[in-house]
Every structure is written in C-alpha cells, then in structure tokens.
Image (spheres, helix red, strand yellow):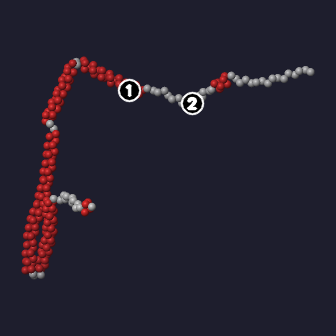
C-alpha cells in the first residue's frame, strides 16, 4: 500500500541553472533576429512608398516616410548591438561550463594520481631498481669471464661444431623424406586349399573294377 500511495522520487534533472540561462539568451536572440527581419521589410516598404509619394507630388508625405525609415535604421543598428551582446554572453556562459567541467575532471585526475602514488612505496621501488642494477652488473661480469676464457681457436671450433649439428639435422630430415615404402601388391592372393583337397589333388582317384564272370563247362 505504501508503495502505491507513497510519493515517488523524481529523477534528478541534468539541466543546470546555467543551461536555463543559456536557453533564455538564445530564445531572446532568435526573437531579435525575427524583429530585424520585420524592420528590414519595413525599411524597403517605406522607401518604395516614399518614391510613389514623390511621383504623386506628395513631398511632405515622402519626407515623413523617410524620417520613419531613418529611425528604424537606428533601431536596426541598436538591435545588432544587442544581438551581439546576447550571443557573446551565451558563448561566455557555455565556455565557462566547459572550463568548470575541465577543472572538475582535472580534480578527479589529481585525486586518482594521488591514490595511485600512495600505493607505491619509494623505498620498495628503490630496492627493486638496486636489485635490477646488481643483476645486470652480475650478468655483465659473467659474460666478461666467459668471453675471456675462450680463445679465437675455441670460437672457431664452436662455430664448426654448430655447423656440423645443423648439417646433421638437415641430413636426417632429408633421409626421412627419401625413405620408400614397399609397393602394395595388386594381384589377388591364391586361395589356400584344405588338407582333404590337397590329398585329392596328390592321389589320383581309384576306379573300382567290376569282377569278371567265369564260364564253367557242364
């Protein structure tokens, strides 16, 4: 029930007071521009009307229209000045907002940098740098010792042995690629005969002869 009838919190507006002021200034600027357009139309209209009056012989009327035209030209000049002031003020406010935002971002960046610096210990960094320097010097000494114990002949022997290893490796690879496997036979294998079939093939089949009848004299 409380959620239904309770007052919901309105989301905070992102429009600042400076934004509202800039909007009002730009609105006034647009109004002045519209006012300028009306004055310019009136100036052209009064000039044409004054020409017509002179053609009709109405000189005083033409003079009055030209005075009105001159007054409106001064108003137009004043409007230009006011318009320039409005645009300059709006631009200054907008630039001030940008500067304020930049200052805020710089402040946040400085705080982040300060927090990062607090995480790093100067003494620990110096110890790491010292250990790194000592390790580099030790490695340099080892390289110096090793290079000093080998003569030019030893270096040549090392290079020769290295060449032998490379050549042996290449020869082994070449030998592996040259191995030929036996060809697969294409003829079908002959069937293997059983023992009984072998015996039949070895001994010819004996033909049984019928006994012959002997005639006895009476």
Using the rendered image of the protein, determine whether residue 189 is visible from the camera's viewpoint: yes
- The quadrant of the rendering that contains the C terminus is top right
Query: Residue 111 or 88: which is nearer the viewer?
Result: 111
Task: Give the crowd class for mark 1: few <14, some 14-19, many >=20 residues within 10 Å.
Answer: few
The vertical placement of 63 against 128, above or below, is below
Q: Position of residue 106 (x, y in %)?
A: 14, 48
Using the rendered image of the protein, determine whether residue 33 is visible from the camera's viewpoint: no
Query: Going by the picture, which residue comes out furthest to the right?
Result: 218
Nearer-N-terminus badge (2/1): 1
Residue 163's image quarter? top left
Q: Position of residue 205 (x, y in %)?
A: 71, 24
Which dot marks residue 212? none
Query: Residue 56 or 68: which is nearer the viewer?
Result: 68
Residue 43's image quarter? bottom left
What SS does tag 2 mark?
A: loop
Q: CA distance from mark 2 to mark 1?
A: 36 Å
Q: Position of residue 48 (x, y in %)?
A: 13, 75
Residue occupying the point 10% across, 69% down: 76
As drawn, is 17 to the left or to the right of 218?
left
- The quadrant of the rendering that contains the N terminus is bottom left
Q: Position of residue 96 (x, y in %)?
A: 12, 56
Would you name the residue on which mark 1 appears? 173
Task: Give the crowd class for mark 2: few <14, some 14-19, many >=20 residues within 10 Å.
Answer: few
Would you name the residue on which mark 2 appears? 188
Residue occupying the point 22% across, 19% down: 150
């Amino acid at each position: 029930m409380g959620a239904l009838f309770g007052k919901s919190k309105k989301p905070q507006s992102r429009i600042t007071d400076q934004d509202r002021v800039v909007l009002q200034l730009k609105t006034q600027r647009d109004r002045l521009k519209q006012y300028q357009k009306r004055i310019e139309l009136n100036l052209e209209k009064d000039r044409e009307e004054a020409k017509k009056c002179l053609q009709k012989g109405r000189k005083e009327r033409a003079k009055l229209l030209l005075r009105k035209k001159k007054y409106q030209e001064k108003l137009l000049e004043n409007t230009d000045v006011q318009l320039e002031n409005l645009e300059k003020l709006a631009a200054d406010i907008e630039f001030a907002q940008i500067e304020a935002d930049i200052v805020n971002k710089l402040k946040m960046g400085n705080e982040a940098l300060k927090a990062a610096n607090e995480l790093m210990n100067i003494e620990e960094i110096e110890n790491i740098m010292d250990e790194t320097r000592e390790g580099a010097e030790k490695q340099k000494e080892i390289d110096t010792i090793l290079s000093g114990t080998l003569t030019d002949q030893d270096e040549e022997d090392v290079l020769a042995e290295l060449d032998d290893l490379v050549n042996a490796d290449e020869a082994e690879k070449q030998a592996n690629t040259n191995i030929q496997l036996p060809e697969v036979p294409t003829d079908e294998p002959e069937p293997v005969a059983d023992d009984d079939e072998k015996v039949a093939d070895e001994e010819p089949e004996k033909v049984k002869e019928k006994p012959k009848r002997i005639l006895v004299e009476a």
